[in-house]
Amino acid sequence: MPDPADPTQPPPPPSPEPAPEVNASTTGLPSNVAAAIACIPLVGGIIFYVLEKRDGFVRFYAMQSIIFGLAWLLFNIVYAIVHVIFASVPAIGVFLSLLWGLVGMLVHLAFVIVWIIATIKAFTGVRWDIPYIGPMARKQFEGTAI
């Protein structure tokens, strides 16, 4: 039996390690990076929903971002209209306007926190449904042929 420390024996060939699987992407970006960029409300979602044709993970986050961005835009429109109405009320308009401003700030803070959570979840590769918006995005996403 040959000595295992014998320098004349060639070392055993290294075992080939399988290359990590990378999802086939239209954009050329890794799935998690593309999904995190797609989380930019409305604009990022539209861009990646149009560009990405194969990666379902990215397309889901893009659709979720489009719906989330539209909800944020709709809130801003309603907020502005109600703010003008409250500000025009005689005598208590200033109070109502300030109170509505505080409500608006809290809602905007909630939108930003949800946006940050969705971006972090996308970057870590976790499929996360934004409450109420995620199921709508999943329904729209499942209705498309990929």
Image (tube, grey):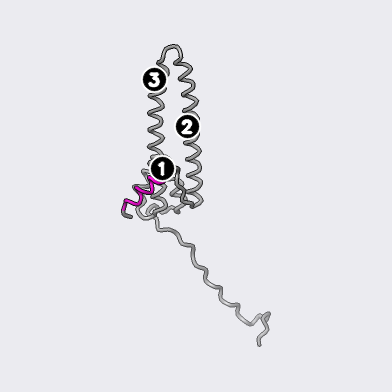
The residue depicted at 38 percent of the width and 29 percent of the height is: 77
Determine whether the residue tagged by mark 2 lies in a helix, strand or loop. Answer: helix
Q: Which residue is at the front of the view, 92 or 119?
A: 92
Secondary structure, mark 3, is helix
- The image position of residue 72, as x and y in percent, is 41, 35
Three-letter amino acid code at the position of disc 1:
Ile
Q: Secondary structure at mark 1?
A: helix
Q: Label for residue 133?
A: 1
Disc 1: CA contacts within 10 A as few (<14), some (14-19) or many (>=20): some
Residue farthest toward the bottom in the current orientation of the protein: 1
Residue nearer the viewer, 6 or 40: 40
Residue of label 3: 85
Examine the image and state in which quarter residue 24 appears: bottom left
Which image quarter: residue 55? bottom left
What is the magenta range?
Answer: 133-144
The reply to whether dot 3 and dot 1 touch (C-beta < 8 Å) is no
Q: Amino acid at mark 3?
A: Ile
Q: Amino acid at mark 2?
A: Val
Separation of marks 2 and 3 at Cα, in angstroms: 19 Å
Queried whether the magenta region covers residue 92, the answer comes back as no
Earlier along the polypeptide chain: callout 3 or callout 1?
A: 3
Q: Residue at x 41, y 27 (%)?
A: 79
Q: CA distance from mark 2 to mark 1?
A: 16 Å
Q: Which residue is mark 2?
A: 107
Going 47% across and 36% down the picture, which residue do you hit?
Answer: 111
